[in-house]
Image: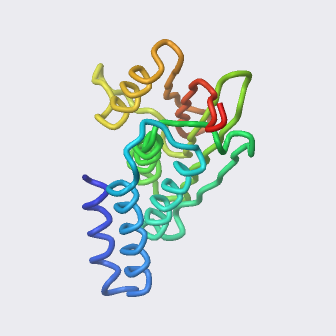
Amino acid sequence: PHFLFNTLNTVSSLMIQNVTDAQNVIAKLADLLRTVLTDAPTQTIPLHKELTFIKNYLSIEQIRFSDRLQIAYHIEPDTENALVPGLLLQPVVENAIKHGISKQAGQGIITITSTQKNDQLQITITDNGAGLQNTNGQSFGIGIQNVQERLNSLYPDQATFTLASITPRGTMATLTLPFKTTHD
């Protein structure tokens, strides 16, 4: 929900500053909502469809953050048809923005990478934010918990999800799951 509220606040601000960008944000938001509300409910989708959703999501965030947010994709072509749980990456990317990019004044960079290693699909999402902060024994937010629970439910003992600080700055989220394609 906070993404929706942030987006609506962005549109409200842009209506005064840049009507064209406001219209673009509304169009992207409509695409995102259409995807969420009308696509057939399936557990898994090809990675390329998940990335299309993420690109739409991040294009809204890029308008919101202006020139402070850069996105890089390193997607191995062989992984584009790998099946992933739908809407799995959005909470991880949103976490990178909320806890990494938005907390700094300078340029933020998010990199999304996919590779196939043996019979595993590995997806990493890195940001150059402050890194993991001490949670004082508290668990991560609901979005991150949901990602972990979905992976555990769909791939018991076959998938992993880790978060780690990286040097010199930033956080790396790594998702590893069985490599299956629409052709399997």
Query: Would residue 82 be found to the left or right of residue 63 on screen?
Result: right
Say how many tags the image has.
0
Front residue (pair 146, 179)? 179
Query: Would residue 28 be found to the left or right of residue 164 on screen?
Result: left
Q: Residue at x 57, y 36 (%)?
A: 83
Q: Residue at x 71, y 31 (%)?
A: 116
Query: Would residue 1 be found to the left or right of residue 174 on screen?
Result: left
Q: Residue 118 sits in which quadrant?
A: top right
Q: Position of residue 128 (x, y in %)?
A: 56, 46
- 3 up-or-down from 117: above or below: below
In the rendered image, which quarter contains the C terminus? Answer: top right
Q: Position of residue 9 (x, y in %)?
A: 27, 69
| Colouring convention used in this rendered image of the protein | rainbow
Q: Residue at x 37, y 80 (%)?
A: 22
Q: Position of residue 76 (x, y in %)?
A: 73, 43
Query: Would residue 178 be found to the left or right of residue 75 on screen?
Result: left
Q: Residue at the front extreme?
A: 183
Front residue (pair 19, 132)? 19
Front residue (pair 112, 137)? 112
Q: Residue at the top extreme?
A: 157
Front residue (pair 53, 130)? 53
Q: Position of residue 38 (x, y in %)?
A: 35, 57
Q: Residue at x 40, y 73 (%)?
A: 25
- 121 up-or-down from 76: above or below: above
- 76 up-or-down from 71: above or below: above
